[in-house]
Image: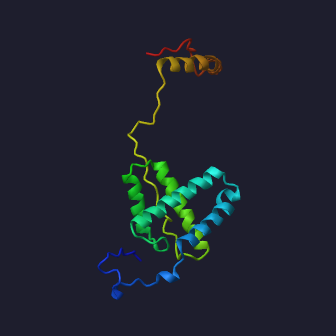
Amino acid sequence: MAIRRLDKRNRFDRSDRPLATVSTLPTIKVMRDCFERYLNLTIADGHASKDTVKTYRSRVHQFLSWCKGQELYPALITKQNVLEYRKHLIDGEKTSPTIRLSLLAIKHFYTACLADKLVKENPAIGVKAPRKKREIGSTIKYLTQEELQQVFDNLAPILKIRGNKTAQAGCLTEVPQSIEIS
């Protein structure tokens, strides 16, 4: 069910009334309290560091502030709304790991609310952070000529021993004495 934003003209139009009334929905405070209990008992099996808990709280607070700015009620958020929030983070030039952590915190927030039956589903399930775009070959590291020479110098004694054994077995007629890099 998509959340409709109400503008001031039709805010009290009875024909546009949502299925649930606000009085039957959990308050944001109830949802936050539920999340606090969840953080203390569940994250890292109840042994989360203070920084982890602080970060999760902060990310959820940012999300709830965004919801308020969009006139969205947290108990009625849909997957589409979470995707819109992800787009908001991307447009704000947040890094992929930052977006991933924000989405994880939101997912935990709704997991806690779902466990306490404050929401019907977790809208953050399946919403992933964008992959960091990499140019082909950008992650390949090359050795300098000096580094490559060091590798060969360190392998030379091993290669020589194996070379002699191979030569003794009749598979190799000549054992290389040096390796040149051009």
Residue 124 on image: x %, y %: 49, 65
Q: How is the image coloured?
A: rainbow
Q: Residue extending furthest top?
A: 177
Residue located at (53% from left, 71% from top): 28
Residue 156 on image: x %, y %: 60, 17
Please give the count of numbered marks on the rendered protein.
Answer: 0
Residue closer to the observer: 50 or 163:
50
Residue closer to the observer: 173 or 139:
139
Q: Residue extending furthest left?
A: 9
Q: Is residue 124 left or right of residue 135?
A: right
Q: Quadrant of the N terminus?
A: bottom left
Seen in the picture, residue 151 relative to 8 is either above or below; the reply is above
Seen in the picture, residue 176 relative to 112 is either above or below; the reply is above
Q: Is residue 45 left or right of residue 89?
A: right
Q: Quadrant of the C terminus?
A: top left
Residue located at (61% from left, 74% from top): 116
Q: Is residue 57 left or right of residue 44?
A: left
Residue located at (36% from left, 53% from top): 91
Q: Is residue 112 left or right of residue 86?
A: right
Residue located at (47% from left, 18% from top): 145
Residue 77 on image: x %, y %: 45, 71
Seen in the picture, residue 102 relative to 22 is either above or below; the reply is above
Q: Quadrant of residue 81?
A: bottom left
Residue 5 on image: x %, y %: 36, 74
